[in-house]
Image (cartoon, coloured by chain):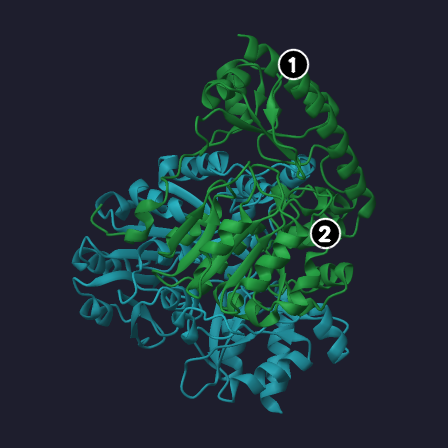
Chain colours: A cyan, B green
Amino acid sequence: MQINYRKELEKIPVYVPGKPIDDVKRELGLSKVVKLASNENPLGFSPKARDAVNAILTEANLYPDGNATLLKNAIAGKFGIEPEMVLPTCGSDEMVDLIAKSFINCGDEVVMADITFPRYYITSQMMGAAIKIIPLKNLSYDIERFKKAITADTKIVWLCNPNNPTGTTFSEQELSDLLEMVPASTLVVYDEAYYEFASGEGYPKNSLAYLKKYKNMLVMRTLSKAYGLAGFRVGYTIGDPELLNVINRVRNPFNVTLLTQAAAIAAILDDEFLQKVVDNNDRGKEYIYKEFGRLGIEFAKTEANHIIFNAKKDSIQVFEALLRKGVIIRPIKGFSPETWLRVSIGTMEENRVFAEALEAVLAE
Amino acid sequence: MQINYRKELEKIPVYVPGKPIDDVKRELGLSKVVKLASNENPLGFSPKARDAVNAILTEANLYPDGNATLLKNAIAGKFGIEPEMVLPTCGSDEMVDLIAKSFINCGDEVVMADITFPRYYITSQMMGAAIKIIPLKNLSYDIERFKKAITADTKIVWLCNPNNPTGTTFSEQELSDLLEMVPASTLVVYDEAYYEFASGEGYPKNSLAYLKKYKNMLVMRTLSKAYGLAGFRVGYTIGDPELLNVINRVRNPFNVTLLTQAAAIAAILDDEFLQKVVDNNDRGKEYIYKEFGRLGIEFAKTEANHIIFNAKKDSIQVFEALLRKGVIIRPIKGFSPETWLRVSIGTMEENRVFAEALEAVLAE
């Protein structure tokens, strides 16, 4: 290839395509697979979203509403805010990309954790950021070190609370202290992808209240997890309309599909389904804690729909051994030694299959 | 706002949200609206795509296949190429953005027409390109001037054939001459969004054949137009796997939704539906030509599903007068004087409503 690509891309990992589950099944001769690898919703998604898709399906030859007016209204209504404070995107993935493209000049400093949602790193790298990495402390964000790392030159602070892949949180007090010390010229991206699952003491459940005071904060949420719309690709960001207007300049106008907008409107208003999901997650969490306890496995208490644990064996080998038993979870990079994995909380039946398979694998 | 956004964004137009059609109807007291503004498919989309969506709908709590393996296979099979030469995206919009992010360094030179698909300009601007603009000549790409503008320093040449919004084409000979003179270090983006509608003499119907010789060419197509999947958001690009691998580094991994992948696989294989669409378009084109002739209206012969014409009145005023009659088309910027508009070819009934409304408006 004689075309030079941007040198910033050199530090971005080369894309390795994953395999469809059907291919994995065929190759390993498995009839059934339990996938607890991607923090998907074991209960599916709201039947109201399914009905909404069916009702509008024949109109999908038309472009979606590029302003997502009705979806913005639904989200704004739910949280008692103005629709101008809401911007839906093709998952949080797209918003992270849009933020990087809007604000990061080559050489700009950004601050993020070492083990967190990987798109912060990739998109910051794409725009040529100078990335300050703050190691986790006891599997959690080390907010004191974040505060020390942030300077007048910091363009963006990337925060994920609860954190993916650890499921751990930092407290309302820590968030509040950090927001207070961050310069007004620094953007605080506060990613709450797992917000709906979090109920622990001290967790900032009313983070939107901070937006009134801190115009430099964006709160990112998704419908991929608790609402179960991962296949539809939709998230939303709440913040100052002036910030969102900047981001709108680089947004592709039809970023959220027509069917997805319809599904999201129905899903976000279905509190009954959401409650079932959270209840199932709470039960599953307690069950897995108990099983980890029984097996003597070190793990982090989670406020999300996934649990990180230390297999005390090479994580790739454990991953592959579980795969051969028809259970897919995710080995997590960045720990030393590399013996940690993340399991998504599934249905009780899936959790049991996982626990049994893990017990067998660790006894091998 | 105290956060500085990238200065490259200053030259990108501020986003102005459009209104949902229902709002337009209400505000203007219209019971029915004919929308011929966005080159959407008047026949809907393949019923096989609808069935495919229904068959997989309950699985949409799962993430889509990030590699779009089955969709790549379907496209590759249709055109007799390797799946590694195919990359599906969230419409052509996303691919244009990915190409810009992958290859344009600040200050890099790119070449494009003045009146063409606007995302080439916006995304090039976003990455800080030095943009050389080549004016249309007789409503068509002026390939001779393109060739003179291209130098060893040119990073990207953006080409749209048939061109949007003019519907005009350049010839196989012109394409072939241009590819031959372009340096191997220059990327030629060849956008065939309206390919399926084009049948005029001299049009390069077998553009994919050039990919064997020219590794610096990418062919972009979409399922939004002839296949009628605009609401689903899906396009695909064909080219050298090495180029696509670079682009994959900055692609969001789940860019095409689960339902969209299923719909696209069914749609791309439904040749019968495609033929109906092309036939309807050919009939509508002849009808609108005849009406323009009767009304003495200057227009460009089209190889796409839209026709550009000169109302000889201010295009915004004509647009607004048609809107009050319940017909939405699009005023086109960039002409001098600004008296040109673009109408999408609809069903015969929609075309008749448009022609009658236009006759009345021009007589006002």
Name the amino acid type tagged 1: Glu
Residue under label 2: B205
The label shown at residue A105 is none
Q: Is residue A198 left or right of residue B56?
A: left
- At 16% from the left and 62% from the top, the residue drawn is A152
Q: Quadrant of residue B229?
A: top right
Residue B37: image x %, image y %?
57, 30
Residue A41 seen in render: no
Protein chain holding label 1: B
Protein chain holding label 2: B
The label shown at residue B356 is 1
Which residue occupies the foreground of this view, B229 or A132?
A: B229
Check disc 2 and report its element: helix, strand or loop: loop
Check disc 1 and report its element: helix, strand or loop: helix
**Residue lying furthest top in this view?**
B364
N-terminal of the pair, mark 2 or mark 1, is 2
